[in-house]
Image: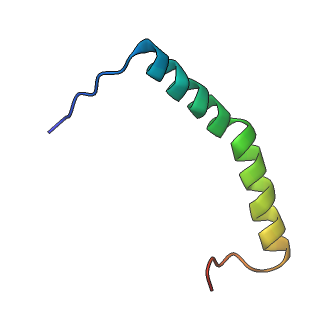
Amino acid sequence: MTTQTWLTQEAADRLAAELAHLEGEARTEIIKKIEAARAEGDLKENG
């Protein structure tokens, strides 16, 4: 079943900005962190 969620324009704009950040700057930062972890030979978390 599909649930409909109503948003104000302000909330929609905020979510759109967050998505743009996650697809842009944040993705680049995460890629660098993963590459650094791979270089150290460790991709495990909490272990």
> As drawn, which residue projects farthest toward the bottom?
47
Q: How many marks?
A: 0
Would you place residue 26 above or below residue 7 in this image?
below
x 83%, y 66%: residue:
36
Give left or right: position of 10 versus 6: right
Q: Is residue 2 left or right of residue 15?
A: left
- Residue 39 % position (x, y): 85, 73
Using residue 47 as the reference point, say whether residue 10 is left or right of it. left
> Which residue is depicted at the point 78% across and 72% down?
38
Tell which residue pokes out farthest to the top in this image: 9
Q: Nearer the viewer, residue 8 or 29?
A: 8
Which coloring applies here? rainbow
Q: Is residue 32 left or right of residue 18?
A: right
Quick one: 1 or 4, which is closer to the camera?
A: 4
The answer to whether residue 31 is above or below residue 5 is below
**On the rendered image, what quadrant is the N terminus found in?**
top left
Instruction: Give the quarter of the image for residue 44.
Output: bottom right
Q: Compare residues 7 and 23 and report the one nearer the observer.
A: 7
Residue 37 x, y percent position in the rendering: 78, 71
Q: Is residue 36 above or below residue 23?
A: below
Q: Residue at x 39, y 16 (%)?
A: 8
**Residue 46 image point, x, y percent:** 61, 81
Quarter assignment of residue 34: bottom right
Quadrant (top left, top right, bottom left, bottom right) of the C terminus = bottom right
The answer to whether 44 is drawn above or below residue 35 in the figure is below
The residue under the point 20% across, 34% down is 3
